[in-house]
Image (cartoon, rainbow, N blue to C red):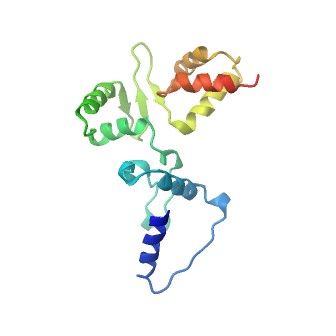
């Protein structure tokens, strides 16, 4: 945050006139998420082209709308980046592993990552923001029966969703469940 303040102060000296406008916190969710991301990531870990996706042109609209689901680095980003741009990690072992694993994935035109399965349809790959809702709906929803973690994972896969930490997340969710 200190580096941001220093850059801001340098930039403000380039303008003859400027105004500061207060935005209430309830209207400032995306900016707050972006500020938290910026302060929690080291410079060498941050690749702004991957982390933040501007949904509208800043010039045309006057302000950017930030897709807050893409504000955090998650397991999907390396696959999406490889499928879109062919970008591989610098480590040769990681590069080979990524190319091998990417054979299971496909990217739709709108940027949604899907995982192909051996014996069934494709599964939508979920990021951290969506997994809790899916687990809750499958476990406690209309057809939910408060099943165990293993059964919960199979049900989530059967309805067409996937993420890398499914087993761990399901165990944690079931453990916290208050029937």
The residue furthest bottom is: 16
- Figure label count: 0
Residue 72 lies, with reference to residue 94, above or below; the image says below
Q: As drawn, is 100 to the left or to the right of 76?
A: left
The answer to whether 43 is drawn above or below residue 127 in the figure is below
Q: Quadrant of residue 74?
A: top left
Q: Quadrant of residue 95?
A: top left
Q: Is residue 93 above or below residue 156?
A: below
Left/right of residue 111 with respect to residue 145 in the rendered view: left
Q: Identify the residue at image location x=48%, y=65%.
A: 2
Q: In the image, residue 144 lies at what x, y percent? A: 69, 20
Looking at this view, is 32 or 85 the one in front? Answer: 32
At horizontal 25% and vertical 28% (from top left) the residue drawn is 96
Q: Nearer the viewer, residue 52 or 118?
A: 52
Residue positioned 48% across, 46% down in the render: 70
Q: Between 54 and 35, which is closer to the camera in this rendering?
A: 35
Q: Percent from the top left, x then y, of residue 22?
A: 63, 71
Residue 162 against residue 3 in the figure, above or below:
above
- Which of the image's four quarters has the C terminus? top right
| 177 lies left or right of 3 | right
Is residue 164 visible in this depiction of the protein?
yes
At horizontal 46% and vertical 78% (from top left) the residue drawn is 12
- Give the residue at the far right of this rendering: 179
Q: Is residue 68 left or right of residue 122?
A: right
Question: Where is residue 104 shown, x and y percent of the image?
Answer: 35, 24
């Amino acid at each position: 945050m200190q580096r941001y303040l220093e850059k801001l102060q340098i930039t403000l000296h380039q303008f003859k006139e400027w105004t500061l406008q207060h935005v209430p916190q309830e209207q400032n969710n995306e900016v707050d998420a972006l500020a938290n991301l910026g302060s929690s990531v080291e410079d060498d870990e941050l690749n702004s082209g991957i982390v933040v996706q501007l949904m509208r042109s800043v010039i045309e609209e006057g302000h950017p709308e930030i897709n807050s689901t893409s504000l955090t680095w998650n397991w999907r980003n390396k696959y999406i980046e490889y499928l879109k741009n062919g970008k591989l990690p610098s480590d040769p072992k990681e590069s080979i592993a990524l190319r091998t694993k990417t054979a299971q994935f496909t990217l739709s035109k709108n940027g949604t990552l899907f995982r192909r399965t051996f014996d069934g349809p494709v599964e939508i790959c979920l990021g951290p923001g969506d997994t809790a809702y899916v687990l809750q709906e499958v476990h406690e929803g209309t057809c939910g029966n408060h099943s165990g973690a293993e059964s919960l994972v199979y049900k989530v896969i059967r309805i067409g969703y996937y993420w890398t930490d499914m087993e761990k997340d399901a165990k944690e969710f079931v453990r916290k469940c208050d029937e």
